[in-house]
Amino acid sequence: MSTERVADLPLGEALALGLMHGPAELLPISSSGHVALVPWLAGWSYSELDAELRKAFEVALHAGTAAALLIGLRDEVGEATRGLDRRRLELIVLSFTPAGALAFLLERPIERRLGTPATVAGGLAVGAIAMALADRRPQERTRDQAATRDALALGIAQACALVPGISRNGATLAAARARRFTREDANTLSRHAALPLIAAATALKGVRLSRRGLPPRLRTAFALGTGASFASTLASTWLIRQVERDRSLAPYAAYRLVLAGFVARRLRAQSRR
């Protein structure tokens, strides 16, 4: 991996992105979208890094988040593990497979063509509309009633969330609420579908990163970002209950639309210069 731009990842930016990643991952607002947009809007040097370095840093942030979620949700993870039977295992596989297959086939094209401010803004807007429409559906089912079609809906939602800005959390919440699950059970299903995928993707990309190697001068910044992501996720797990208690996903959808509009306005202003 080239080290030409190693110095372009200041420790302050690595720390700020790590601290932001935890809450952004727990709320349906797209952590990957924010990691792409905030440095661009703020004029940070992070946005000028080599694409491979940015992707590697995002992997590090997700590793911190995944570790914190396993600790912060250890009781829920333990309960789900103890209650794992053939039916639940099949549902997990079905909710995992579409995103895993799409990532295997199209990961590189997605990384090359998407993740720009314009495409992230589009993902934020599309995801916001989906969330708002799904939240209007009746909510009457419990997670114990989840079946094959529900698992596939979650899987397709996670596949769509490979597009930066869509949000894995937002997409799976929208899918579960569209399938008429109660808000609390929709959140639980969203987490149970997302955790295996986050862990698997982090492990796979971590192996790739270890094979390529990390420039020595980046190691401190990566460690700081990972630690900050871990700490901010662990400190923000209360946000999960806040989303469950909210009457609607409308506030999150509105925030996403406002951010997308702000990005579009900035892009128009730049194009006129």
Image (tube, rainbow, N blue to C red):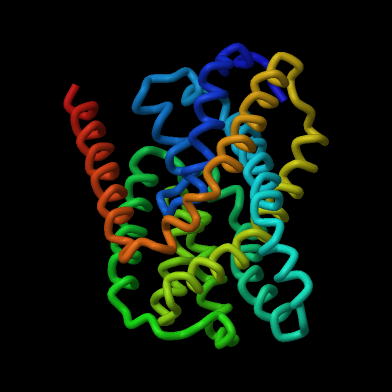
Q: Name which residue lies at 48% across and 36% down.
A: 35
Residue 55 visible, this orientation: no
Number of numbered discs on residues: 0
User: Which quadrant is the C terminus positioned in?
Assistant: top left
Q: Is residue 20 left or right of residue 42?
A: right
In this picture, is 86 found above or below 71? below
In this picture, is 124 found above or below 7? below
In this picture, is 181 found above or below 217? below
User: Which quadrant is the N terminus positioned in?
Assistant: top right
Along the viewing direction, whichever of 49 and 37 lies nearer the viewer = 37
Q: Name which residue lies at 47% across and 50% down.
A: 239
Estimate the x, y position of residue 253 in percent, counting from the top left. 30, 56
Estimate the x, y position of residue 155 in percent, counting from the top left. 57, 71
Estimate the x, y position of residue 212 in percent, counting from the top left. 78, 32
Along the viewing direction, whichever of 77 and 34 lies nearer the viewer = 77
Farthest residue to the right: give it. Answer: 211
Q: Is residue 71 left or right of residue 246?
A: right
Q: Name which residue lies at 25% across and 33% down.
A: 267
Q: Quadrant of residue 181?
A: bottom left
Estimate the x, y position of residue 141 in percent, counting from the top left. 46, 85
Q: Is residue 219 left or right of residue 40?
A: right
Q: Name which residue lies at 75% across and 49% down.
A: 204
Residue 25 visible, this orientation: yes
In this picture, is 135 found above or below 147? above
